[in-house]
Amino acid sequence: MMKFKDMPYKRPDVKGYIEKVKELTEKFKTTDLEKQIEIIGEVDKLKRQLATQGTLVHIRYTIDTRDEFYKKELEFFDENGPKLQEYISNFQTEVLNSKYKKELEEHFGKHVFNLYEMEKKTFSKEIIEDLVEENKVSNEYQNLIAAAQIDFDGDIYTLSRLAPLMQSTDRDLRKRANEAYFKYFTDHMEEFDDIYDRLVKIRDRMAKKLGFKNYIELGYLQMQRSDYGPEDVKVYREAIKKYVVPFSQEIYKKQIERLGYDELKYYDESLKFKDGNPNPHGEPETLIEYAKEMYSDISPITKEFFEQMTKYELFDLLSRDGKMSGGYCTMLPDYDAQFIFANMNGTAHDVVVLTHEAGHALQGYLSRKQILSEYLFPTLEACEIHSMSMEFFTTPYMDKFFEEDAEKFRYQHLAGTMEFLPYGALIDDFQHYVYENPNATPKERRNKFRELEKIYQPQRDYDGNEFLESGGFFFKQNHVFLRPFYYIDYTLAQICAIGFYKLMKEDYENALNIYLELCKLGGSKSFLELVKSTGLPNPFEESTIKRAVEIVKEGLKETDETKL
């Protein structure tokens, strides 16, 4: 193991990689079981090597999107990734057709064969150029976000750095900061509309080339959803409308009372308490030290994990000019290492993103020795269980980060689950409309988004902001552009995380052990199989949504709101 900064990058030899995979594919067809197992391992090693180099490029580019070297290397991967996929896909087809399939399933587990079957349906030579184009257009969106330089009160801000001002206790400052933030999207509305329009049409074109009715069918397969489909998600969204939306409105009404306002404008929603939101005490370096102490206290395995993260500097946390927005966790398979990327800005979100991404990283750490690279991470809705549940497992330690404001943070975090679920369902509902109607105009899409906002977030008052009234809020949600149908995964995981919250209140150590066992499984099972392994209820069942609301209601009652 070495520090992240010392990990060497070398552009892969694409021709050599292709020839090696082709050679192994031919050998696989004519050999015995023992040799087939060995060849699957050899191909997997090649995939890990390629993934490691590609991930190094991605991390270093997102850290500084102005770095011309890594920009060119990212373009190299965007151009060649889909072409390499063809040869991996051919190999996986031979694995599926093996006369030893039953024995291979016993050795590697059945789930990887489900993954291969889904990938077989989502790829063909015909769409390689479309995949390359999709990558390029997606990068246009990321570059446009990263390029934001907002002149506000005499200073220049990135989108991320405006966040503290957007939560100011000064209502006029808060309003102006929000207006400045969304003015960037207003000024570039045609560009955002155009980028999204092209992405939608590329994806629709790919789906139809592959024989699907629309991109929804292809998108679900690309998300590797093997045990539920669009109808299940539709029923799930209806349950959120039925149980969560009404309760979220109660939470907003209490917020209005706390703030002493007659009505809540969109720029007020981020201010939860009249005297200000809880902010962490200390610089980012201090927060890392607090986190190190916290993970040392939680368990020996979390202590070991976090010490590796700090020892080898597997973080990049500060917001800077040219840095990509948002946060993520990723894995470097050749090093059995995880990496956390964030944009700290002095708000409570710094602690949320640190614990959230640490949940992902811990899962990667615990499943790093899985037999196949497909099992290193599970499908994304299962990944988010690890992250969102970790947010809850760390709440008893928030006094260290927030001191006298720790109870405020815990209340805000728990209430926030009920504010988030309707938004997550809104994003998903919107995307289903978009891909059912790929020829809708940008204006029609924005109108639809605003229409759905009024259903899922009826409290939202844009105070006459023309851009937001036109339905442009989704421009800021990168998942809509970059990862279609991903966003509902956060909500499914949130329901599961609320289940862990209930378990940890009853018996913290037992809940933690169940969570750690889930992490160790990595991606060796499908989403619902992983949920079942924990004993948590199926999130698609209406009763589960109803119970989640009751759990949060009960939890919020434990706080004396008059003291917040």
Image (cartoon, rainbow, N blue to C red):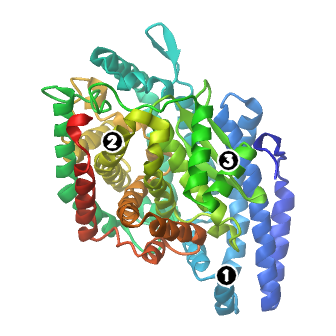
Q: Which mark's residue is nearer the viewer, 3 or 1?
A: 1
What residue is drawn where x is 77% and y is 83%? Answer: 37
Report the Cα–Cα distance between label 2 and label 1: 43 Å
- In the rendered image, residue 434, in percent from the top left (x then y), is placed at 36, 50
**Going by the image, does 39 lie left or right of 258?**
right
- In the rendered image, residue 412, in percent from the top left (x then y), is placed at 33, 41
Q: Secondary structure at mark 1?
A: helix
**Going by the image, does 151 lie left or right of 468?**
right
Residue 108, numbered circle: 1
Q: Quadrant of residue 519?
A: bottom right
What residue is drawn where x is 47% and y is 7%? Answer: 154
Q: Quadrant of the C terminus?
A: top left
Q: Quadrant of residue 143?
A: top right
From this view, report whether residue 537 is shown above or below residue 493.
below
Q: Which mark's residue is nearer the viewer, 3 or 2?
A: 2
- In the rendered image, residue 354, in percent from the top left (x then y), is placed at 54, 43
Of labels 3 and 1, earlier in sequence is 3
Q: Secondary structure at mark 3?
A: helix
Q: Which residue is mark 3?
A: 78
Q: Which residue is mark 2?
A: 412
Tell me if residue 75 can be seen: no
Q: Secondary structure at mark 2?
A: helix
